[in-house]
Image: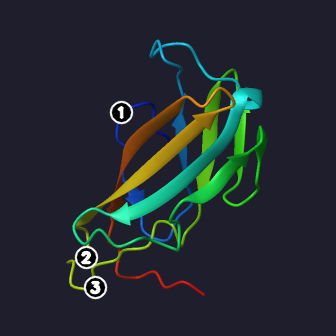
């Protein structure tokens, strides 16, 4: 599953891996920021309804000083970042949500460049409740 800027992910089944793909852009809104020019990039995952943080992803460092941290895993090709979301990142938060219903999660990406330019990005993630999946 993949997402481009401002387009929601396809529906992700709870407890599955998925990917966030996005291109952080500079002040002109169209030029991709190279990895080497990113001093920090963080990820926050929240359940939209409860606003609770999911899987302790509250300002989790993705990139520090132009390099990926490894948790969550990530890569970049031609300015397009790909971040791996784990099954715990795609867990249903509302235990009363009926089977087959969709829960909305928000991935909030914060980027700061080496020239102190800051940018926020929100990506909607739609997670389908299977009521069959348990984390180990």
The residue at 44%/39% (across/down) is: 120
Q: Which residue is mark 3?
A: 95
Residue 46 shows in the view: yes
Q: Quadrant of the C terminus?
A: bottom right
| Vertical comparison of 113 with 15: above or below | above
- In the rendered structure, which disc, 1 or 2, sits on the residue that comes first in sequence? 1
| Left or right side of 112 for 100 | left
The image quarter containing residue 52 is: bottom left
C-alpha separation, residue under disc 2 versus residue under disc 3:
10 Å
Q: Position of residue 62 (x, y in %)?
A: 66, 51
The residue at 60%/31% (across/down) is: 116
The residue at 72%/27% (across/down) is: 37
Q: Which of label 1 and label 2 is nearer to you?
A: 1
| Left or right side of 104 for 64 | right
Q: Which residue is mark 1?
A: 6
The image quarter containing residue 80 is: top right
| Vertical comparison of 111 with 58: above or below | above
Of all residues, the one furthest to the front in this rendering is: 116
Label 2 Cα neighbours within 10 Å, binned few <14 / some 14-19 / many ≥20: few
Q: Which of label 1 and label 3 is nearer to you?
A: 1
Q: Position of residue 87 (x, y in %)?
A: 55, 69
Q: Secondary structure at mark 2?
A: loop
Residue 9 shows in the view: no
| Vertical comparison of 104 with 31: above or below | below
Total count of labels: 3
Q: Position of residue 113 (x, y in %)?
A: 63, 31
Q: Secondary structure at mark 3?
A: loop
Q: Which residue is mark 2?
A: 99
Q: Secondary structure at mark 1?
A: loop
């Amino acid at each position: 599953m993949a997402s481009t800027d401002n387009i929601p992910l396809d529906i992700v089944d709870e407890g599955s891996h998925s990917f966030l793909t996005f291109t952080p852009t500079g002040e002109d809104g169209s030029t991709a920021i190279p990895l080497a020019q990113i001093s920090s990039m963080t990820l926050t995952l929240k359940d939209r309804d409860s606003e609770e943080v999911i899987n302790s992803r509250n300002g989790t460092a993705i990139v520090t000083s132009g390099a990926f941290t490894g948790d969550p895993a990530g890569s970049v090709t031609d300015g397009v970042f790909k971040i791996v979301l784990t099954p715990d990142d795609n867990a249903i938060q509302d235990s009363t949500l009926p089977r087959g219903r969709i829960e909305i999660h928000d991935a909030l990406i914060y980027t700061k460049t080496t020239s102190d330019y800051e940018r926020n990005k929100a990506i909607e993630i739609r997670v389908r409740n299977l009521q069959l999946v348990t984390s180990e």
